[in-house]
Structure formats: C-alpha cells, structure tokens
Image (tube, rainbow, N blue to C red):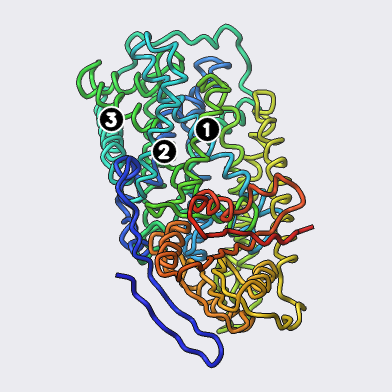
Amino acid sequence: MTSYHHQQNDETPIIHRTADYQPPRSWRTWLIGHPLTTADASHQTIGKAIGLAVFASDALSSTAYATQEIMFILAAAGTAAFSNVFPISIAIVVLLVIVSVSYEQIIHAYPGGGGAYIVARDNLGEVPAQVAGAALLTDYILTVAVSISSGVAQLVSAFPALFDYRVWIAVVLVFFIMIINLRGVKESGAAFAIPSYFFIVMMYLTVGIGLFRYATGSLGAVIDPPEMEALRGMAAITPFLILHAFSSGTAALTGIEAISNGITAFKEPRSRNAGITLIWMASILATLFMGISFLAGKIHAIPAESETVISQLARTVLGGQNVLYLAVIAATTVILIMACNTSFAGFPRLSALLAIDGFLPRQLAFRGSRLVYSRGIGALALIASGLVLLFNASVTGLIPLYAIGVFMSFTLSQAGMSKRWWKIGHLQPGAEVKERGSVLRYERAWQLKMIINGFGAVCTAVVMMIFAVTKFTDGAWVVLILIPVMVVTFSGIHRHYKHVATQLSLENYGAPPRVQRHRVLLLVSGVHCGSLKALRYALDLSPDVTAVHVSIDAEEAKHLQDKWETWGEGVRLILLDSPYRLMIEPLLEYIEEVIQQRQPNELITIVVPQFVARHWYHGILHAQTAFYLRLVLLFKPDVVVTDVPYLVD
C-alpha cells in the first residue's frame, strides 16, 4: 500500500510518497542477508564486547609477531643483544599509552568518527587531511595483505603440500572476509567475537602460566630451539640497530586508530562506548606484548622462520606440543587471518568520509543493502588481493611497507589535537564554536592537554622518521612515493567535483525565464543549473509536468524541497521515499503505475537531467541514471526516455 503525505504551499504542491517496492529474494539475499531499511540503522550498532572483536583484531594480532620482529633485528648482534628486547618493548608500550590517550581524546572530541583524517581536516588544513587519509587507507590495504599472507604462512607451515596454492588460498580468504563484512557490522562482529576472545584467553593463559612458572623457578628454557641464521654475520649493538629493532616492534601499534574511525558503529552513548573499548584494547595489547617479550627472554627463545617465538613460548610454558599448545597455535593462526577484519571495518568508513568531502568517487559513500559501505568493502578486497598476487603472498616482501603510514597518521592526528587545544585555550569561558566535525568549548586544562598531544606528535614523528630511514631500502620507499601519488589523485578528484558544483551552482543565477508548460516526468536528483535546464525543456514539451525525486535521506529531501519551492516554477514535485536506499526500482514502480493509468494515444516522456564532463574519465565519478533507464524501458510502448545534457567545462 503506497502512502502519501500532501503538503500544500501557496504556490508549490509537495507530495511525500513511500515506495511499496521491496527487494526480492535472490542469491544475494542468501549470500549477504536480506536488505535492511534505513530505519534499521539504529539496530545494527554494536556494544563494547562486539566492538572489541570488530576493531581490535589487528592490534591484538600484532602480539603474535611484534616481539619476534624485534628479535629478528637484534639477532644480527647475537644472543647477547636479546637483553634489549624487554626495554625496547617498554618503550613501545609507553608510545602506545601516549597514542591511546590521544585517540581517546579524539573519540570524545569527534563523535562522528573519522579519526586522524577529520582531526587534520578541521585543524591543520586540506592537504594534511589528504595525507592522513592516504596514509590510513594505505595501511588498511597493507593490513589485509599482510595479515592474510601471515595466516596462510602459518597454515602452509602445518601443511607443506599447500605451498604451491598459498596465493590463491590467500585470495579466497580475502573474499571470504569480504562476504562476512558485507552482511553488516553486527553480523560480522558476532562471527568474529568467538575467535577473538578465544585468542585473548589462550594468550593470557600462556603468559599467566609462564609468569607463575618463572616466579616459582620452574620455567626452564626452550628445548631444541631452532637455528638462528643471523649469527653468520655478526654485527655490533649500535644505536642504529636498537632503533631498527624499535621500529620493527612498533608494528604492535597498528590498528589503534581503527576505533576512532568507526565510532558511529557503536551503540549510544557512542563516544563513551568507543572510548572504553579503546582502553580495553590498549590494556590487553600492552599487557600481552610486555608479557610475551619478558618471557621470550627468560626462556631464551630464538627468532627463526622455521618456528615462531609464540610457538617456542607455548611449548615451553605449557609442557610440550599438547592440546593446549595446539589451541594456542590455532588461535594465533585464526587471529592473524582475522586481523584484516579491522581494515574491513575501518577502510570503508574512512573512504566514505573522503568521498563525502569530494576526495574519492561519491559512490564510496553509498551504503549498501545491509547498511554497510559495500562498495568500499569491495574495493578493499580487490586492491588487497592484487597486492597478494603481486607479492606472491610473501610476508617478508610486504612487511617493510607496513606501519609507516599509520605513524604518519598518528603524527598528524596528535598535531591536529594540539592545535585544537590551542584554539580552545583562546576562547572565552562559556563560548562555543561549531566546526565541521566537532564543537569547541573552553577548558581549563587546555595547556596540559596541548603539551601532551604535542609531545605525542613529536614522538610519533620521530618513530616515523626512524621507520622511514631503517626500512627505506627494504621497501618503505614505495609507501613514501605512493602516499604523495594518492594525495595528487585526491586533489584531482576534488577539483573536478568543485568545478562541477560551480557549474551547477544557483548563485548569481538570476530569476528563471518564463517558459511554456508541457507534461512530462522529470527526474530530479538535485536542484541546480542542470535540473533547471531540464525543467525548461520539459515545460516546452507539455503543460503537464511532474517532477519526481527518490528520497533516501530525509534531510537531503527537505533541502531539495525548499529549493524546489523557490526554483520549481510551481511544478508539482513527488518525493518517493525509498527506505531501502534504492534508486532505479522505486522509479520504475512509479513509471509503471503512470503507464497503466495513461489515456489512449498518450505519450509518456521521461526527462533525465545529465551533465557531461569534458573528459571521459570523469564520467565514472557520476551516476548514469539515463543510461540504465533507457536499457530497462527500451521495449515499453509509447514511453520515451530523453536526457538533457548540461556541459561542464
């Protein structure tokens, strides 16, 4: 039953109409679930427990390899250098605390999400925001490629016969995680919660038993440790070596920013729930990382490709390769594969923010049938799979590209927060300033907070420089080139959208000329120069004109309605409310209704405004509604679909 709501104004009739169309069941329904209405959005949010599983898998998985990465670098100086593992781990945990405090502030200051990108945009400017966005998107993509490749490496170690198929196994796993995420945040969180908490329990059990055995003097050392190949080329323990090991261990901090990007996924009160989840994640990460690093030194673990440090720790602490040992290895393998879920939660949300601001194609801001940014999820899966194929699923080849981007975003976010505190400190008590992403209010402790964030920005900037120098020849140079290229691409897309907006702007447009009336169905996506040109054309065709707009956002529809009352020449406007955010299907349903009610020998003309960009490749940045309607309505008798092009120079 179609519902109508009439709103009669003095000049312009406005009709609200809700479409009856419901998406039918299909293979997509079986694969990703039945479509959800926009009204269901509030029911798809998650609590702290599920949020930890969704957003913390990347950070928690790093405890499985961060200690080993430190030891791999120190191994060049021999086993004596391993005494530095725990002090380096302490320094990394201090850095973790600084970054976590900063992001906890960001969560409360920017409840709409966006993390480093929004902070940099509102406080440092457009270019730093683009750099932060590019750095985080790069890190998210690499997280998927590295975590999946690492998990497959664990699997291949257990089953060597699968070695030749490792690349395709990795690609299949990427698309498996993609499909789970396409089902929605709530369902993907529930699916990943059990493995995440299983890993946490098994690691705490291992570390707890290890510390107890150390305290009681029954811990012992690794039995039959693997050979350490690095001993063949001995090096001195130099500051550069320590810094190199430190930079490798900072991989433990990747994923810390994910919660600040996904605040909107949490139940109300969103900021409070997201902030508590961040504290939980940082606490678990810090304690497990410190415990593993401490025990690795006490059992004299050896970093080697043939057996991981976690494996050596588990069999030493748990008394051999028993059921508990196998459970630890299984949990570690699963969490390494699941680590990419953090990226599937963060990448689409961040790319949607960039798309809304005009730095990426607008289509990435579209929420799919399950209320997730499905196009961003698909794009991430495709790009990450391409990286896996390019690097042959090699963790060694991918790891040098990893983490530099995230430290760049850490630096920009903390510098932005420091600037934000400075602006707050220069407000009058009681004053309030609204910015795009937050509201500024005077706070007494602004100077202390500004110093903390400024110090954090310096620390993360130093780590970023250390990472860039120590990992440069290993492949970090690729990221240092890729991020500027991405920023240039963002700028190009943004210039195009701004140019289009300027061309379509009604500013200084003047009064629309009086034209003759004529009846058509005029499809209106927005009120701008292009749609007004199509309106004039429609009025020249017939005196009976009906403008039709498919509404998927109530605020946007209200804004369009207000502009139509000014610029619509008194032409009636039908607003088709589309609760499933579908565009073509409600239009087709309405057009079919009009066709069935038409008089004999009546011609129905559908006019579609369409602006044409000068360059062909700009076309992919815009919807092609007229093209799709032509295909669908091609065989309908007495129905004409015509587009009215508006050339954008």
Q: Position of residue 358 (x, y in %)?
A: 64, 57
- Residue count near mark 2 (Cα–Cα under 10 Å), binned few <14, some 14–19, many ≥20: many
Q: Position of residue 512 (x, y in %)?
A: 72, 80
Closer to the camera in the image, 64 or 373: 373
Which image quarter: residue 327? top left
> Which amino acid, by three-letter code, is at mark 1?
Ala
Closer to the camera in the image, 459 or 65: 65
Residue 423: in sight, yes or no?
no
**In screen coordinates, is 364 left or right of 360?**
left
State the residue at coordinates (37%, 77%): 4
Q: Position of residue 628 (x, y in %)?
A: 54, 51
Q: Disc 1 on helix, strand or loop?
A: helix
Q: Which mark is residue 510?
A: none
Q: Which mark is residue 178?
A: 2
Distance from label 2 to label 3 (Cα)?
A: 31 Å
- Residue count near mark 3 (Cα–Cα under 10 Å), binned few <14, some 14–19, many ≥20: many
- 141 up-or-down from 472: above or below: below
> Which amino acid, by three-letter code, is at mark 2?
Met
- Residue that carries the numbered disc 1 in the rendered image: 384
Task: Please tell me which of labels 2 and 1 falls first in the chain.
Answer: 2
Nearest to viewer (mark 2 / mark 3): 2
Distance from label 2 to label 1 (Cα)?
A: 11 Å
State the residue at coordinates (58%, 51%): 627
- Residue count near mark 1 (Cα–Cα under 10 Å), binned few <14, some 14–19, many ≥20: many
In this view, the residue farthest toward the right is 649
Task: Please tell me which of labels 1 and 3 falls first in the chain.
Answer: 3
- Residue that carries the numbered disc 3 in the rendered image: 206
